[in-house]
Image (cartoon, coloured by chain):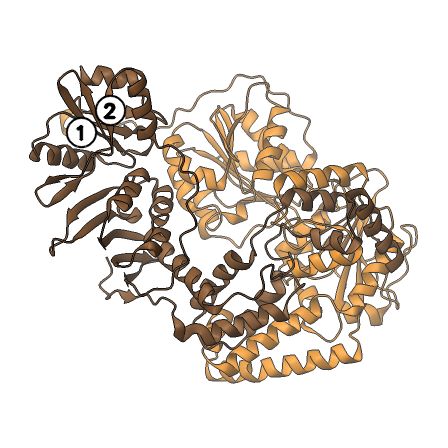
Amino acid sequence: MSARAATELRLFDATDAAWIGAVLDLVERSLGEPWRVLLERIEHAHLRVSPSRVNTIVCALRRVIGGRADRSRIARKVRSLVLGHPVLDRDARDARLAAAGCVLGIAPAEVETLLWVDLAKERPVTLPNGRPREAVLAAFANLDRIQRSVRRARAVRLRVWDDAQDLVRTVARYGLLAKISRGTDGRSTVLDVTGPLALFHATTVYGRALAALVPLLADRTRFALDLHCDFNGHQRSLHVEPPLLLPAVPASRQRAPSIADYLARDLADAGHHVEREPPPIASGEQLLFPDLIVERGAVRWWVEVVGFSTAEYLAHKLASYRESGIRKVLLCVDSTRSEGHAIGVGSIIQFRRRIDVRDFERAMQ
Amino acid sequence: MADIGVRPADSVQPKRLADAWSVPTLRWYQETALARWQAAGHRGVIALPTGSGKTLVAIAAIARLGMAALCLVPTRVLLDQWARALAACWPHPIGRLGDGDHHVAPITVATYASAVSWAPRLGDRFGTVVVDEAHHVGTWCPSEVLEMLAAPARLGLTATPPSPGGALGQRIGPVVYSLEVGELTGDALAEYDVVGVPITLGDDEHERYRSLRKRFSAVYSELAHANPDLGWNEFVRIASRSAEGRRALEAWRGSRALMAYPDGKRAALRELLGRHAGSRTLVFTGDNATAYAIARELLVVPITHEIGRVERAQVLDRFRSGEISVLVSSQVLDEGFDVPDADIAIIVGGTASPRRHVQRVGRVLRPRPGKRAIVYELAVQETKEVEYVQRRRGGLGETRARASIIASASGLGPRSKDRDPAPSPASVLAVGPAIGGAS
């Protein structure tokens, strides 16, 4: 750890509106020109803010107005039709574009637009939905900045008020290493999530999973997120709480079934009585969130599916269940995301992708 | 341990290879290079020009040593190229680490990036390690990789050896054999002419260039005067702090952009492509923006890092078959890329780096009976570009280079390969000094 004090990371708010507006002016000036030209104009503009803040807004711009590369198949097709021997005069050039347009059934001008549409810096700048508001860019920039920070964090503490059940289930669903407890005020729930930099492997995958949690905070009226992160040896800290500009959580799409959902269905098919998402269990100050309760005869088994894990994490979890008076516990551990566990107890079932019901039944026996 | 009679063994015992090689006969300089490497205790760097068959030297070295070998290459394209070359000489499967493959065999090719993660697990399995484009050792190819490999036999291959010492010298060994382009021209490499094409800026362009350079120089001179040891990076760091400094940097970028592709270069490029219509031509630019500008205007194929692997392969196949005759690129074609045979190189822009220049020129030197390649260098008069051209030409080797510098008054060199006019002194001076006599 560096001896230097951590620097506070600044998010974006209404005070940034003026210079973000200047960036949007440049976007309008660059319509139809390659993104490269826009980026050069932004770089040369005297915006009087740090380059890192400008870069974050550029990333937000790409998300909002679609500066990311796409439509690669059509662009490749257009290039294969249009690019070839050099055309040395205007007429030959027009003729080639027209010929390609005929094949594709589009106008020559559109052929030219599609030529580089998949290349991030060469595609033309467009505003498909008009000029975005400065606040929208600031919201996406905040999302980007918080997500980048959690990907470089050693530990993340998220405190939420009101019902935390959904958020906790999402944490479990993403397979994050988390300790959940009641807040000291008795009304909040505290999620202490291990940061990617505290792990020894799969840090990128884990960081991405942890970052996916951030957009969900936009729905919360009250929360507090604290983290310490490391950017190339520079310690940074971040404290986030509302009011905060964040993009609205996208309308919920069909949720793909989780591993626990599949297990519940398979166990039910095998004739077991299964209870999904039972209420949390208190274990000292900590809260445990089992995914299922499976009844086998008169015996009830508490089941939790664990994504990322370490030996210590699993041992702690089992101890917590025991402390709460629950002995019949089965932890289903994703072997591709675990850092080895030498715990010689029958309470752990290892799986890859999906849990085999026969393994599960053997463990219950 | 010695006290209790335990003697640790610290020798590498790599797998011996069956004698099943079918290596083509080496040329004289390849044999000499290999002999020098063997005499140096199987450690050292062989420096041969692009297109002169370095890969074959390495395959012969592996075959003669008969030990399991790991070949490290910088790019995925070279991974394929090496695997194909080895498979043509060795009947057993070739291991591949990189580009989604994780298969280890007694003869394995790995990208530098994959070697970083695999070296700790493979360190004791190979007796020979070959590093292609070895000038990247210590930078792109981290020294740690070579520290983790216990292979006693080490061979580095490069067209452009760095100065002695450094990571390459420590991890691989000294340069044991070196030839320059000029020494193989007409033998293992095609004969070639270097044609300097002087470009004049239009009045408006010239005025703009002068104004931009003036704005830049005012700030740069002031800072350099205050700090005589001022390096470029330090200058950028200091200049970025003030509005005046930022304006100077912007002016510098503007002058570079103007020099990269002014109207004169535009016209010269059209003229040259028209003159050599149908010939396989590689156009090299100083930056991607110019490469795309040329691609847009002339509807030719750009090869940049943004063009995906599959599309690149398709484009190169079309180039090979003659379906397309021109490729334009800023850096991707410089090295680490299996470019099919080409006759003409047009250098629209670039840096002063001799290393990069050698790699670029090497792209058109693959020999073919009766071939005489032409390298055109476009340089804007009265700008820094003339200095860049002079500096980078040093990389081609001045002593025995058979290249002829031909610059006609019009600036566009010979019309046919048969014509070989005497250089116009004025034009030659305008572009830079000759690096060899006319052939």
The residue positioned 51% from the left and 73% from the top of the image is A21
**Which quadrant: the C terminus of chain A?**
top left
* Residue A347 circle label: none
Q: Nearer the viewer, residue B171 or B431?
A: B431
Q: Kindly identify which residue carries mark 1.
A: B2
Which residue is at a point 60% across and 33% down the rendered structure image? Answer: B80
Q: Are marks 1 and 2 on the same chain?
A: no
Colour given to chain B in the rendered image: orange
Q: Colour of chain A?
A: brown
Badge 1 element: helix
Q: Residue flagged by tag 2: what amino acid is it?
A: Val
Q: Is residue A36 above or below residue B181?
A: below
Q: Assign a secondary structure to mark 2.
A: strand
Vertical position of residue A140 compared to residue A314: above or below = below
Residue B349, quarter of the rendered image? bottom right
Is residue B230 visible in the rendered image? The answer is: no
* Percent coordinates x, y for residue A108 in the rendering: 79, 53
Do we see residue B14 in this rendering? Answer: yes
The picture places residue B426, in percent across and down from the top left corner, at 84, 72
